[in-house]
Every structure is written in C-alpha cells, then in structure tokens.
Amino acid sequence: MKLPRKVIFGCALFLVCASALLYWKHSVWPYGMRSCCLPCMLASMEGYAYEHQGWYPKGGKTPLESLTILHDKPNYVGDGSSFAGISGDENEAERRIKLGLPIDETVSSWVYFPGFRNDDDSKIAIIWERQGGIIFNGHSCDGHAVGFAGGDWEQIPQAQWSDFLKNQEVLRQTALAKREK
C-alpha cells in the first residue's frame, strides 16, 4: 500500500516543526523551567532568618547541608527539588531529602555561604547558581544568578564575574571581622 504524497509531506513537516520546537526549548531552557527557583529559595531563607535571630541557615557539616536545614520545617521549602538549584538534579535532590541523605555538589548547583545574617551588608552574596548562562528560573541568560543578604537577587554578567568574586571575598571577610570584635 502506497501512502499519498500529502500524508508523507504532512508527516515530514510535523517532524521538522517538532524537532525545531524541541531544539528551541532546549536552547532557551537548558535545564527545564524552574519557576521562581532563586527568588523562592531566598524567600525561604528570609523566613528562616526571621525566626532565627536574623541568621541564615548554618551549622551543617557542609554549606549545602546547612542550606538543607530549611527542609526541617515545611513552611520554608516545599519539596526537596528546591535544593537542586537551577541546573542541579531535581529528582535526585528530592529523593535524598526524603531519605534524609546529604545534598552535595553532584546533586545541587547552589553555592551557599553559611554564617551570615539578614542585617549584614546587603551587597554580600550568600547564594548563587554555580552554572553560568542561566537566570533565576532556568532560562538562558548571560552570567550567574546571585542572591544577596537581605533577600535581593541579581544576574551578574559573565564579563564581571571574576571581579565580582574578588569583591565578594572582601565583603565576606569584612563582615566576619566586624562580628569577631
């Protein structure tokens, strides 16, 4: 049985359109859509700080384990997928959280700095996305998504990233030195 040319052409056109759509989606959302990932994590951290004398999560064996303290109370973070970060493995992060296993860099893309407070210098970055090239919700964008003490977030362009990291080291050391006095 021979298929009509219109059917073959229609199927070919559908496959071309579907392939183009999938390519576009992957280039725009390389890790899938992660709605409100950084802003929601910052809001959770702010809520935690409000209830803990201004301190952001701290006290874990590693910075990421400190961050997962947010999961101890369900009103901070919903499921464990939030701990994956913007480009991390959401399914594995959620699985580990449910089983009480630690989160590490193989699962989470967050870079977190425990030991800071919500009244520290608001220019201090306390959390950011390790992977460059995506914004707070997983969309492709130049630079790194960064969250600051006080709850604001910003996209730092890749061309400024090296200087940003140097400046952050100075800001963190200054804040910690003030605390020691």
Image (spheres, rainbow, N blue to C red):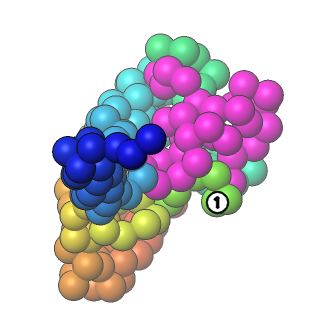
Residue at position x 21%, y 84% in the image: 159
Which of the two residues, 143 or 27, is positioned nearer the viewer here? 27
The image shows residue 77, relative to residue 153, as above or below, that is above
Q: Residues within 10 Å of mark 1 (few under 14, many from 20)?
A: few
Give the position of the N terminus as an image quadrant: top left
- Which sits in the foreground, 16 or 135? 16
**Image coordinates for residue 33, horizontal then vertical, percent:** 34, 42
In terms of depth relative to the viewer, which is nearer, 72 or 14?
14
Residue at 46% x, 54% y is: 87
Q: Residue 21, position in %: x, y? A: 25, 51
Q: Is residue 102 magenta?
A: yes
Residue 135: quadrant of the picture: bottom left
Q: Is residue 85 above or below residue 46?
A: below
**Image-based side of 19 in relation to 62, left or right:** left
Q: Is residue 120 visible?
A: no
Picture quadrant of residue 137: top left
Residue at 57% from the left image edge and 17% from the top image edge = 73
Q: Is residue 161 above or below residue 84?
A: below
Q: Which residues are magenta?
A: 76-104
Measured from the top left, where is residue 107 in percent x and y?
A: 64, 52
**Residue at 23% of width from left, 50% of height from top?**
5
Count the labels in the image: 1
Q: Is residue 75 magenta?
A: no
In the image, taking residue 46 as reference, residue 111 lies left or right, namely: right
**Left or right for 170, reference 88:** left
167 or 25, which lies in front? 25
Residue under pointer 1: 105
Q: Amino acid at mark 1?
A: Glu
